[in-house]
Image: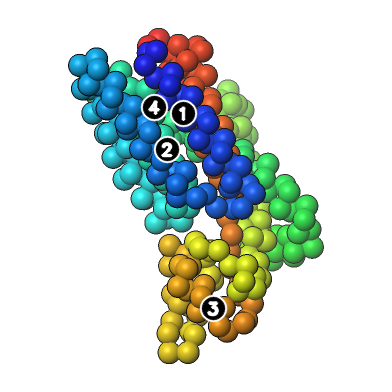
Amino acid sequence: MIEYYFLFALGIIYLIVASYEDLKKTEVANWITYSFVAFALAYRGIYSVLNGDYRFFVLGALGFFVFYLIGNLLYYAKAFGGADVKLLRAIGVTLPYQSYFGLIFTLLGFIFLLFFVAFFYTLIYSVFIVYFNKRRFVNEFYIRFKKYKGWMAVLALIGVLFLIFSIVYKYGMIGGAVFLITAVVPMMYVYLKAVDSCMVVLVSPGKLMEGDWILEDINVGSKKIKNTVHGLTSQDIDLLKKTNKDIYVKRGIPFVPAILISFAIMVFFFAVLKQNFLFFPL
């Protein structure tokens, strides 16, 4: 297990630097993400050669490959940005694997942990978005609440009936859980959609960044800049600068700090508690 301590330290350092870049500039330079992967793979390769343990390198390479696939799925679903996906690949190299079966277990465990952390991180971060966009948020929330209030009332009623039924037949905890899901989740959906609308900003061409998502295709003379999952390229930005017109773009929440928190929790479990995510001894 001690062979992973260098990878843990490497991951924490890189993710701290990447988090700072993400919070300050809302983007992470490629040299950070690519060198993270390169150093992690190089360490595994050197360790494997010196100790004759080639499985150590193979497991890291497999971790990279699996997170490469998962990261691409999240990227094309617009759940992750480009830098987030690249950092996820690097983490695939740094996670501790004791076997090929353990690799799958650890990767899935980290993904579930990341989603759990991301949920609360997004909620906390959204509070600041709402604070700085109060009027816009209230208007958007009212519009979306009015649109979905019928379905929300039906789901809440189902939850209440299920709760009463569960209490009568002494399954109160199950009924309470169903009630929370049917009553809280729809409201949370409306809240997050209202927050999402607050992240659409009007930006001058000179302040556009690579990866910014436009809301629709834009015609610039005879050329068309398409609204794609990859966002704007440097060539697209050069074209838009010629128009000298402000552009509506959607910018996401800086997500790298959530990845850092998840990785730090993982390190605490494995390096301090000497246990995995479900508390089975290593």
* Residue named by callout 3: 240
For the question of whether residue 62 can be seen, the reply is yes
Calculate the distance from the C-alpha at mark 4 to the C-alpha at mark 1.
Answer: 11 Å
Question: Which of the numbered marks, if any, corresponds to residue 10?
Answer: 1
Q: Farthest residue in the bottom direction?
A: 222
* Residue named by callout 2: 36
Disc 3 marks a residue whose amino acid type is Leu
Residue 10 position, x and y percent, is 46, 28
Disc 1 marks a residue whose amino acid type is Leu
Disc 2 marks a residue whose amino acid type is Phe
Question: What element does badge 4 sit on?
Answer: loop
Crowding near the residue tagged with mark 1, few <14, some 14–19, many ≥20 C-alpha atoms within 10 Å: some
Question: What element does badge 3 sit on?
Answer: helix
Calculate the distance from the C-alpha at mark 2 to the C-alpha at mark 4.
Answer: 13 Å
Q: Quadrant of the C terminus?
A: top left
Calculate the distance from the C-alpha at mark 3 to the C-alpha at mark 1.
Answer: 39 Å
Which of 170 and 84 lies nearest the eye of the viewer? Answer: 84
* Residue named by callout 4: 95
